[in-house]
Structure formats: structure tokens, C-alpha cells
Image (cartoon, rainbow, N blue to C red):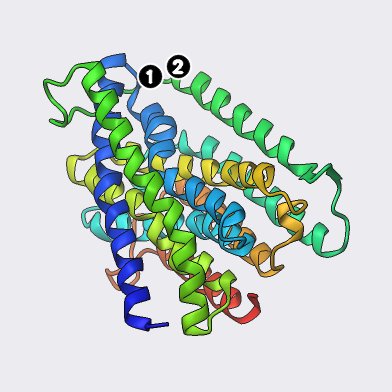
């Protein structure tokens, strides 16, 4: 198989997601404006769902068509640590003060739920590695628990946002569009993301075979980076217009949705509990995401105001080192 052609297909698929992802955000933002939703709630629910759509579609495609469960789980958990890594970029672009001093402490609620949900996945992987794969038919007992946790997290966040109302960030996007027009364009952009997400794991399998890499590594690093492109674009756009809380809630909300995607993947995976069919190296990725979420919570409470030699804050450095460690272990232990 021609190495160049596989990389070209991977780049093309990533480009489709990169183009369609911001369109999802643009029209999702317009829908939110017309329906009167709050800024943080838009980031947590509507934008997080939209930008995480590639992870969901990629995961479903990976376990049904490509028969690559490692790519499905690696993509979801890899996206979680990649989303948290984006905090480092936002901090570097926030040159006046560390970004952790500019965001609301209410994000601790979402980050805390992320710790619980991602930690549950990591524990489930370890238990399955030890042969304790509790199931009902082909579905893991952890799956309904993860779905319930996601619903509780969304409800708790919604209730919190009702009590602490913040102004919606105004942005000249989709101006003049009616709700119906915005909804139709949102669906059109989502269709492109769905098609690209369906194709992506098939390319990932080809890439792993061509390069001689493990599917665990490919899913956790390459596929996860590709499907996280929409979050990346949204975060930069939000920082540019000063809607930093929308960017943060999008990243943290995407992590919750990515864990939900693992539960949905388990529902459609017919060969048994999904987490019993994947490499134990994914547990390291899950716990790296838990550690990074914990570091973020510490940052929101401590509010650091200094940088190491004026370049990077110790919070961002800690996030970066944890990400690199998780990626390295995934490469060493993956299957």
C-alpha cells in the first residue's frame, strides 16, 4: 500500500472535519442566539455536542465497519487529553494574564464530572483486564452507569447555569438567518462531519498497517487529534472574540460527550463488552485525562499569576508533561 496515498486520505478527511466543524459551531451559535440560551450552556451542550460529533461517528464506524475497537476507545480518550492540552495553547495565547485567571470557577463542576466519568472508564478497563467483565448480553454493566452520569452532569450544569446567569457573548455569525435556515445549515454541516467520521477509522487501520504502528497509538494520537480539530478551531475563535468561558465549557463538555461516545460504541459493538476488547494501555490515557482535569481544577482554585521565565505557567507545563507521558506510554504498551 502506498504510504503517500494513505497520508493524503488522512489529510483530506481531517480537512473535511476542519471545514465542517466551524460551520457546525457557526450555525449552532445562531440557533442558540435565537433560542436565548446562555453562553456557557451553549459551549457545554450545543457546541460540545457538535464538535464531538466526529468522535461519536468515528467510534461507531470503528466498532461496526472497521472492527477496530482500539481505535474507537483510543479516539475518545485521546480526544479527552487533547482537549485538555488545548488549555496550554489558550494560556500561551493569553499573554496579559494566565488564562486560568480569566475564566469562571463554575467550570470546576464540569471538570469534576469529567474526573468521575473518565476515571470510571479507566477503572473499567483495568477490571476487564483482570477478567471482571460484568455484562448484560454483550453490553458492559458500566455502560448504563456512564449514560446516567452524563445525564446527571448535564442536568446539574443546567441547574447551575440557571442560578448563575452570564451574558451571552455577542458575535456576528449567521446574522440574518432564521431559526429554520440555521437548523438546515447545521444539519448539512453535520452530514459532512458524519461522512468524514465514518471514513476516518478505515483510514486509521490502513495507516496502522502501512506504518507498522499499533491501532492503540493511531487511535489515541492521530485519529484523536484529527477528530479534535473542531474543538481546536472553536477554542481559537472563542479566544479571539473574548468568549473564553464558551471555549472552556466547549472543551470540558466535549470530554463528557466523548465518554458518552464510548458507552454508545459499546451498545453497537456486537462482540462483547467494548472495554474488554481493548488494550490496557487505554487505562493510562484515561488516568492521564483524570490527572489533567485535576490540574485544571487546582488552577481554577489557585489562580496562578506567574509564568516560568515569562514563557509558560507551571499549570500549563504540568498539563503538557502529563499529555506527553500518556502519549509515550500509549506508544510503548499499545496493541
Q: Quadrant of residue 137?
A: top right
Q: Bin the neighbour count of mark 1 within 10 Å (Cα to Cα): few under 14, some 14-19, many 20 and up.
A: few
Q: Which residue is mark 1?
A: 165
- In percent of the image, x 76 and y 51: which residue is there? 273
- In percent of the image, x 24 and y 29: which residue is there? 169
Q: Is residue 230 left or right of residue 149?
A: left
Q: Is residue 151 left or right of residue 173?
A: right
Q: Quadrant of residue 181?
A: top left
Q: Are marks 2 and 1 in contact (CB under 8 Å)?
A: yes
Secondary structure at badge 2 equals helix
Where does the image place residue 92, in percent across and percent down from the top left?
28, 61
Q: Quadrant of the C terminus?
A: bottom right
Q: Bin the neighbour count of mark 2 within 10 Å (Cα to Cα): few under 14, some 14-19, many 20 and up.
A: few
Q: Quadrant of the N terminus?
A: bottom left
In three-dimensional space, the C-alpha distance between marks 2 and 1, rounded to whole angstroms, equals: 6 Å
Q: 300 or 2: which is nearer to us?
A: 2
User: Relative to 58, is 203 above or below?
Assistant: below
Secondary structure at badge 1 equals loop
Q: Is residue 242 visible?
A: yes
User: Relative to 173, is 35 above or below?
Assistant: above
Number of marks: 2
Disc number for residue 126: none
Q: 161 or 103: which is nearer to us?
A: 161
Q: Is residue 102 visible?
A: no
Q: Which residue is mark 2?
A: 162
Q: Quadrant of residue 226?
A: bottom left
Where does the image place residue 99, in percent across and percent down from the top left?
32, 50
Where does the image place residue 26, in percent across and percent down from the top left?
23, 35
Where does the image place residue 134, in percent across and percent down from the top left?
86, 48
Amino acid at each position: 500500500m502506498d504510504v503517500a496515498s494513505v497520508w493524503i486520505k488522512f489529510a483530506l478527511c481531517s480537512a473535511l472535519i476542519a471545514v465542517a466543524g466551524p460551520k457546525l459551531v457557526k450555525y449552532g451559535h445562531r440557533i442558540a442566539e435565537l433560542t436565548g440560551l446562555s453562553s456557557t450552556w451553549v459551549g457545554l451542550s450545543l457546541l460540545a455536542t457538535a464538535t464531538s460529533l466526529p468522535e461519536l461517528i468515528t467510534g461507531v464506524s470503528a466498532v461496526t465497519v472497521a472492527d477496530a475497537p482500539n481505535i474507537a476507545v483510543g479516539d475518545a480518550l485521546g480526544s479527552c487529553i487533547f482537549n485538555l492540552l488545548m488549555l496550554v495553547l489558550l494560556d500561551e495565547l493569553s499573554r496579559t494574564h494566565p488564562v486560568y485567571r480569566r475564566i469562571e470557577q463554575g467550570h470546576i463542576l464540569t471538570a469534576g464530572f469529567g474526573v468521575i466519568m473518565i476515571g470510571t472508564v479507566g477503572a473499567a478497563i483495568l477490571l476487564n483486564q483482570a477478567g471482571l467483565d460484568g455484562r448484560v448480553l454483550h453490553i458492559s454493566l458500566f455502560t448504563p452507569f456512564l449514560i446516567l452520569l452524563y445525564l446527571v452532569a448535564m442536568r446539574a450544569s443546567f441547574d447551575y447555569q440557571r442560578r448563575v446567569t452570564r451574558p451571552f457573548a455577542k458575535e456576528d455569525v449567521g446574522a440574518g438567518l432564521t431559526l429554520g435556515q440555521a437548523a438546515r445549515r447545521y444539519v448539512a454541516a453535520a452530514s459532512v462531519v458524519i461522512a468524514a467520521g465514518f471514513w476516518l477509522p478505515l483510514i486509521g487501520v490502513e495507516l496502522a498497517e502501512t506504518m507498522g504502528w499499533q491501532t492503540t497509538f493511531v487511535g489515541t494520537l492521530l485519529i484523536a487529534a484529527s477528530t479534535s480539530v473542531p474543538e481546536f478551531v472553536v477554542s481559537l475563535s472563542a479566544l479571539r472574540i473574548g468568549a473564553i468561558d464558551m471555549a472552556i465549557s466547549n472543551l470540558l463538555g466535549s470530554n463528557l460527550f466523548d465518554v458518552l461516545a464510548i458507552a454508545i460504541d459499546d451498545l453497537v459493538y456486537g462482540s462483547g463488552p467494548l472495554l474488554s476488547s481493548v488494550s490496557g494501555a487505554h487505562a493510562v490515557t484515561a488516568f492521564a485525562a483524570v490527572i489533567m482535569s485535576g490540574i485544571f481544577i487546582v488552577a481554577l482554585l489557585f489562580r496562578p499569576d506567574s509564568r516560568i521565565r515569562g514563557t509558560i505557567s507551571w499549570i500549563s507545563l504540568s498539563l503538557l508533561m502529563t499529555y506527553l507521558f500518556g502519549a509515550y506510554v500509549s506508544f510503548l504498551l499499545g496493541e
